[in-house]
Amino acid sequence: MSAYDDQNIFAKILRGEIPSFKVYEDDETFCFMDIMPRSDGHCLVIPKTPCRNLLDATPAQLAACMTTVNKVANACMKAFDADGISLQQFSEAAGGQEVFHLHFHIHPRHEGVPMRPAGTMGDMDVIKAHAAAIAAAL
Ligand code: AMP
């Protein structure tokens, strides 16, 4: 497995070098909106410390991320009146990973509504409003 590359886009978001729609942060984790949302409210939870993916994550990084995933998932249930949550994590290119900083995708889900295909840029005003709705439900 390759070494962690601190020029990845999520490391740049953590350093404030590129903007993001923040949902939540604590000392160890950061949550922000996915800009190509596959569901309304699609957001990402990442550790603030370097980690490529699930395979090199420490127990402390995983515990911190899961604590935040739990908080944000419950806020998503409220904010979107959702019926459930899908949690995704991809490790390495063969596993579907495109950005090599550990992240967990949270998708609020509604009965009978499929997730949208990956790779379509969302409407930034809508994404901003969704970030605010999740943050308000925290
Ligand atoms: P993965 O395949 O798990 O590595 O997914 C990477 C995710 O990052 C995709 O869902 C992208 O839409 C998302 N993404 C890429 N660039 C950005 C960005 N600048 N801000 C927020 N999300 C992003």
Image: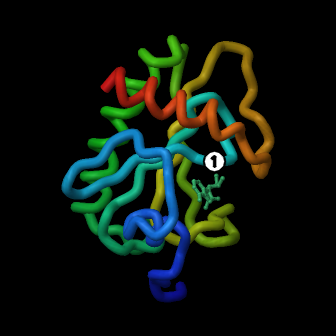
**Left or right position of 105 against 25:** right
Q: Secondary structure at mark 1?
A: loop
**Left or right position of 98 against 72:** right
Along the line of sight, the residue nearer the viewer: 43 or 22: 22
Counting from the top left corner in percent of width and height, residue 90 is at: 58, 59
Counting from the top left corner in percent of width and height, residue 7 is at: 51, 81
Counting from the top left corner in percent of width and height, residue 53 is at: 47, 68
Q: Tell how many labels.
A: 1
Q: Name the residue located 46 percent from the left edge and 18 percent from the top edge.
A: 79
- The answer to whether residue 53 is visible is no
**Ligand 1's quadrant:** bottom right
**Left or right position of 80 against 121:** left
User: How many C-alpha atoms fall within 10 Å of the one at disc 1: few (<14), some, or many (≥20)?
Assistant: some
Residue 108, above or below 9: above
| Residue topped by disc 1 | 35
Looking at the rendered image, the quarter that the C terminus falls into is top left
Quarter of the image where one finds residue 122: top right
Q: Name the residue located 52 percent from the left edge and 17 percent from the top edge.
A: 80
Residue 112, above or below 120: above
Residue 41, above or below 121: above
Q: Name the residue located 37 percent from the left edge and 24 percent from the top edge.
A: 74
Q: Please name the amino acid that badge 1 sits on.
A: Ile
- The yes-or-no answer for disc 1 within 8 Å of ligand 1 is yes
- The answer to whether residue 35 is visible is yes
